Structures are given as structure tokens and as C-alpha cells.
């Protein structure tokens, strides 16, 4: 499995400005998730994948229900933060695999037979689904058969 660099995940979440400080390690990223990520991180992940505001909202509200998101002041809950980080990690990996954001977006939003016909982005809403999407990308990188 390919291990994603924390700085790329941090960039997708919005960088040090949004997170409040630089994230240099997986331990620091985990600490930030456990404390609760800023609400803006979820919007940043959605913007990274979708240019259309309606599509961004659909993704965001699959992670945090709309009414709950509106009630949140500054921080997501640790569980919501974990889902947001997981999406950012899968997006970061797709960008690293394709070295092109448009091609990564296409992969993330296209149903894939190896993950039950789900899109990798939909799969990444659960930990096991994210692992499946990451495994598909690892096979692509290493040229392994499906």
C-alpha cells in the first residue's frame, strides 16, 4: 500500500492556515482529527473534487448531515473529522497516482468494477471502502492485475 504524505493531505484539507498549524507527521494529523478539524476542511475537500457548488454540498452532506453542519460552530466532531480526513487521503492518493487533478477527479467520480460498481469517492465514505479504492490505485501504480 502507498503511504500518503501528511503534507499532501494537509494541502487538500486547506493547509496550515485552515488547520491552524502545519501538519508534519501522521501523528500530528491524527491529533488534529481527534481534536476535530475545522468545518472549512470538509468544504475544501469537496471543492478539490467538484467545481459545481451543488455537487460539493451533496458530498459534504453525505459526510455531515446538512442540519448538523449548520449547527456546527467551528469544528467537526472527531468522527466527522475522520471521514473528512479519509476522503482527503483518497483524493491525495488519486492525485499522486495520476499527477493530474482532472484525471484524478475522473477516477474518483467514475464507478469502478473492483469496488462493486461504486465510485472511489463513494467507497471512501467508509474505511473499508477507502481501503478498496486505495488498493485499486496501488495496483495501478505497481501494474498488478485486478
Image: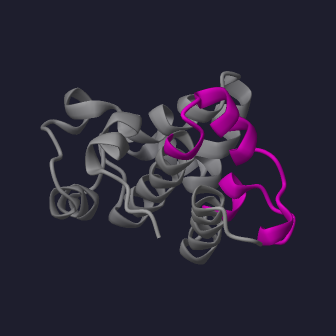
- Quick one: 27 or 32, which is closer to the camera? 27
Residue at the (31%, 51%) spot, across then down: 5
Name the image colouring.
one colour
Instruction: Give whichever of 41, 16 is nearer the camera.
Output: 16
33 vs 48, nearest the viewer:
48
One can see residue 73 in this view: no
Horizontal and vertical percent position of residue 75: 30, 47
Instruction: Give yes or no for residue 97 being in the magenta stretch.
Output: yes
Whether residue 94 is visible here, answered yes or no, is yes
What is the magenta range?
96-124
Image position of 142 with respect to 70: above or below: below
Instruction: Please state, as top left, top right, bottom left or bottom right, where the C terminus lies in the image.
Output: bottom right
Q: Position of residue 26 (x, y in %)?
A: 23, 61
In the displayed structure image, the side of residue 139 where residue 68 appears, left or right: left
Q: Is residue 6 left or right of residue 58?
A: left
Query: What residue appears at the point 80 percent right and 70 percent down from the top-left corner?
Result: 114
Q: Main secondary structure of the magenta part?
A: helix
**Quadrant location of residue 11?**
top left
Q: Based on the displayed image, in which of its 4 quarters is residue 25 positioned? A: bottom left
Taking the image as shown, residue 99 lies to the left or right of residue 144, namely: left
Residue 80: percent from left, percent from top: 44, 59
127, 133: nearer the viewer = 133
Q: Please tell me in which quadrant of the rendered image residue 59 appears.
A: top right
Point out the residue furthest to the bottom here. Answer: 128
All told, the count of numbered labels is 0
As for residue 143 lying within the magenta part, the answer is no
Question: Residue at 53% across / 54% down in the picture?
Answer: 90
Residue at position x 24%, y 63% in the image: 30
Task: Residue 35 in the image: state x and y as whole percent.
Answer: 21, 59
Amino acid at each position: 500500500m502507498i503511504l500518503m504524505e501528511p503534507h499532501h493531505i494537509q494541502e487538500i484539507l486547506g493547509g496550515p492556515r485552515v488547520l491552524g498549524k502545519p501538519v508534519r507527521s501522521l501523528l500530528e494529523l491524527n491529533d488534529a482529527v481527534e481534536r476535530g478539524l475545522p468545518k472549512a476542511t470538509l468544504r475544501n475537500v469537496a471543492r478539490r473534487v467538484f467545481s459545481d457548488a451543488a455537487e460539493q454540498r451533496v458530498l459534504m452532506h453525505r459526510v455531515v448531515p446538512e442540519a448538523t453542519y449548520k449547527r456546527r460552530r467551528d469544528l467537526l466532531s472527531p468522527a466527522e473529522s475522520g471521514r473528512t480526513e479519509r476522503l482527503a487521503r483518497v483524493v491525495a492518493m488519486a492525485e499522486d497516482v495520476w499527477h493530474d487533478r482532472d484525471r484524478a477527479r475522473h477516477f474518483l467520480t467514475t464507478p469502478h468494477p473492483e469496488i462493486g460498481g461504486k465510485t472511489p469517492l463513494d467507497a471512501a465514505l467508509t474505511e473499508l471502502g477507502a481501503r478498496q479504492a486505495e488498493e485499486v490505485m496501488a495496483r495501478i501504480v505497481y501494474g498488478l492485475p485486478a
